[in-house]
Image (cartoon, rainbow, N blue to C red):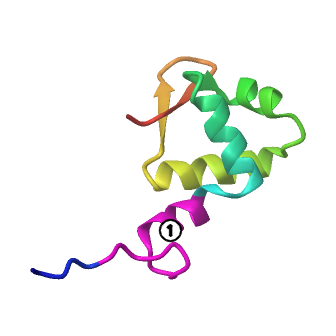
Amino acid sequence: MAKTASPPSVLEPQCPSRLVLDRIADKWTALVIQILARGTIRYAELQRAIGGISQKMLTQTLRSLERDGLVQRKVHPVVPPKVEYSLTR
């Protein structure tokens, strides 16, 4: 009988599960994902929904999630600019 490799432990630094947890486990990221799970939302609405998050921290969190492919940013070509955020599928 062939031996099968056991899945990596979440305690190992290179475990895929740990990499995901490290990425989304901080306070603001978890809150942003929770709110975006409800549907598409504009920046100011997202900031009001979270409460207590600075503009700088929200921008950093959204950029990081967008870079990681978890959040989609859609810019509408209107004046004033309209930007919406949603979770990727």
Q: Is residue 58 left or right of residue 23?
A: right
Pick the front one: 89 or 85 = 89
Magenta region: 6-23
Residue ID at (49%, 29%): 75
Q: Is residue 56 above or below residue 6?
A: above
Whether residue 59 is visible to the viewer of this picture, yes or no, is no
Q: Residue furthest left?
A: 1
Mark 1 secondary-structure assignment: helix
Residue 36 falls in which quadrant of the image? top right
Amino acid at dot 1: Leu
Q: Is residue 56 left or right of residue 82?
A: right
Q: Specify the quadrant that holds the C terminus.
A: top left
Residue 37: % across, % down: 57, 29
Q: Is residue 64 left or right of residue 6?
A: right
Residue 46: % across, % down: 72, 29
Residue 30: % across, % down: 68, 46
Residue ID at (35%, 72%): 7
Q: Residue furthest front?
A: 1
Q: Is residue 46 above or below residue 78?
A: below
Residue ID at (58%, 51%): 63
Please check the rendered image and state whether residue 39 is part of the magenta-colored stretch, yes or no.
no
Q: Is residue 5 above or below residue 17?
A: below
Residue ID at (47%, 55%): 67
Please check the rendered image and state whether residue 16 is part of the magenta-colored stretch, yes or no.
yes
Whether residue 26 is visible to the viewer of this picture, yes or no, is yes
Q: Specify the quadrant that holds the N terminus.
A: bottom left
Residue 21 falls in which quadrant of the image? bottom right
**Mark 1 neighbour class, 10 Å CA radius: few under 14, some 14 to 19, many 20 or more:** few
